[in-house]
Amino acid sequence: MDFSEQIRILQAAEGNLALLTLAAVDLAFPSLSADERARIKDALVAAAVPHWVDPGFLTTLLRASAEEGEHRLGQLRALTVVESFPARGENAVNVHEAARLALRDHLRTTDPSLWRDLSERARAHVSSSREPHARIEALFHLFAVDQPAAASACGDLDREFTTGGNPELRHALAIALRELSTGNWLTGSAQVEALLAPLEVRCSRGDAASLEGAAREVVELSRDASYPAGTARSLCLLGDVLLVKGRLDDALVVFHESLVIFARLVAVDPASADWQHDFAVAHSRVGDVHEAQGRLEEALAAFRAYLAISTRLVAADPASAAWQRELAVAHAKVGGIHQAQDRPDEALSAFRECLDISTRLAAADPANAGWQRELSVAHAKVGDAHQAQDRLDEALAAFREDLAIAARLAAADPANAGWQRDLAVAHSKVGDVHQAQGRPDEALAAFQKCLAIAAHLAAADPANAGWQRDLAIMHSKVGDVHEAQGRPDEALAAFREDLAISARLAAADPTNAGWQRDLALAHHRIANVAQEPGEARSNARLAISVMERAAFMASENMGWQRDLAALRSIHAGMGA
């Protein structure tokens, strides 16, 4: 083939990537007949429908003999748009992503019947395997064949991966679904599922603050599609986003709406363990908001509903690791309220229930990152209870267990902001105990590790109020150590960083009792170290007035009531 003929072939493609990819066959095999090149092109199009092919897979797609399948795959290997894909075997190949997507879309729009037929053949081929990657691939092709069935199957598979504590499988599913959703050909519940699961994964990995617009879009799409399960889940996603952004009242409204929908789904099908689970988790989300608002009795009622449903699920299916995990989390949430209500024995008992379950799950499946993360959190909860009762050695032992697991998870997935945050908190808890034990150097080292992570997360996602609050807290802890070691200038600088962030958060949502308390304590710390008397008195007055507001909003939180009494006592001599 001379140069002019090559130019003619490329010009005929008119810049269309799919046609340019097919033209590569003509350029690679100029001596073959037009009919033979057409058959190679057919093989290339078929190979672009799934994410990979091997000789047997291509044979199925082409409905050819094994010999022809092997021959066509050998020809495809000569093309620059085809590469080896060892993840699926030594003989597997895949069409480069850009070319594959272009060919799929070209086939879908020019020959939809063949597109669906090839998708069905691909689905049938991989459906014999129960490996997670094969199940994701089968689901991927079902969307081309039967969108409503695919939506239902997608929800089931995502739920299985989520409740099974398999974040890496959820991530793999999300990647496949994002590819589907960018094609803009899905409709109704299928469109909702393809959009929702990837957003939920991003939220779980610490990217929640940037997702409000996308979450609201999926809520509206779900409503338009009359898809209540999708509406409830997308409302939960939106609520999670609003909670991270500190908009507690808005989050509570959204979570209540999702709770009502799940209640209706449960009423329609009481025997469905999945709906029972979703209903339980919706109670938990409502409880999270009540807890953040300082309404502990309402939070406890919601968490007890979560616990009761989880207990029934475990009783009905003791072998389900997913239900065991929910029971562990429910115990931990109830324990957290007991601790806030100054009931340390009940808190420790609940946290130990959580730890016992989490230990069994992690031991049964050590490779499960989700179970390892739950075990890490359970150790931290037990450590919190020990620390509250001044059992510092026991607390430090628990926090070191937490830190060891959190460090392994963060190292395994550095891009997971949620796990990086877990590591920061683990360092902070170890530092707290060191400080309480009179080891300021060790405390400062731990706090500075936490501060570095918190600063990175806050800079990467300034809209995430949770990251901002973490950063403020770490500045305050570093300042506390400087103050204890007689370095007032360094302490004051750190406390001012804390105050600046805390003031912004408290102003953004005056109804957030926790942020009001943070602001009160930031003023208190500056009042303690400020060398200028006017600054000290002003901050002392503000510490008490803001803490009065926080304590009034969270009247059931005995710890906060003690905080208020302490501030009044400490600053009484300053005219506050």
Image (tube, rainbow, N blue to C red):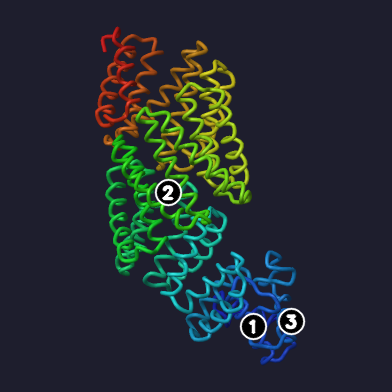
Residue flagged by tag 3: what amino acid is it? Glu
Judging by the rendered image, the residue that carries numbered circle 2 is: 208
Q: Residue at x 74, y 72 (%)?
A: 91
The quadrant the N terminus occupies is bottom right
The quadrant the C terminus occupies is top left
C-alpha separation, residue under disc 3 versus residue under disc 2: 47 Å
Label 2 CA crowd tier, 10 Å (few <14, some 14–19, many 20+): many
Q: Position of residue 109 (x, y in %)?
A: 47, 81
From where the camera sits, is residue 512 visible? no
Residue flagged by tag 2: what amino acid is it? Ala
From where the camera sits, is residue 452 visible? yes
Mark 1 or 2: in front is 1
Q: Position of residue 225 (x, y in %)?
A: 32, 69
Judging by the rendered image, the residue that carries numbered circle 1 is: 60
User: Which numbered tag is attached to residue 303?
Assistant: none
Question: From the viewer's perspective, is 566 left or right of 452?
Answer: left
Is 184 rendered above or below residue 411? below
C-alpha separation, residue under disc 1 versus residue under disc 3: 11 Å
**Res 44 → quadrant:** bottom right
Residue at far top of view: 573
Judging by the rendered image, the residue that carries numbered circle 3 is: 70
**Reading the chain from its start, which is encountered first: label 1 or label 2?**
1
Secondary structure beneath dot 3 equals helix
Question: From the viewer's perspective, is 576 left or right of 35?
Answer: left
Q: Residue at x 45, y 78 (%)?
A: 146
**Reading the chain from its start, which is encountered first: label 1 or label 3?**
1
Q: Position of residue 297 (x, y in %)?
A: 29, 37
Secondary structure beneath dot 1 equals helix
Query: Closer to the camera, 254 or 459?
Result: 254
* Total count of labels: 3
Secondary structure beneath dot 2 equals helix
C-alpha separation, residue under disc 1 versus residue under disc 2: 42 Å
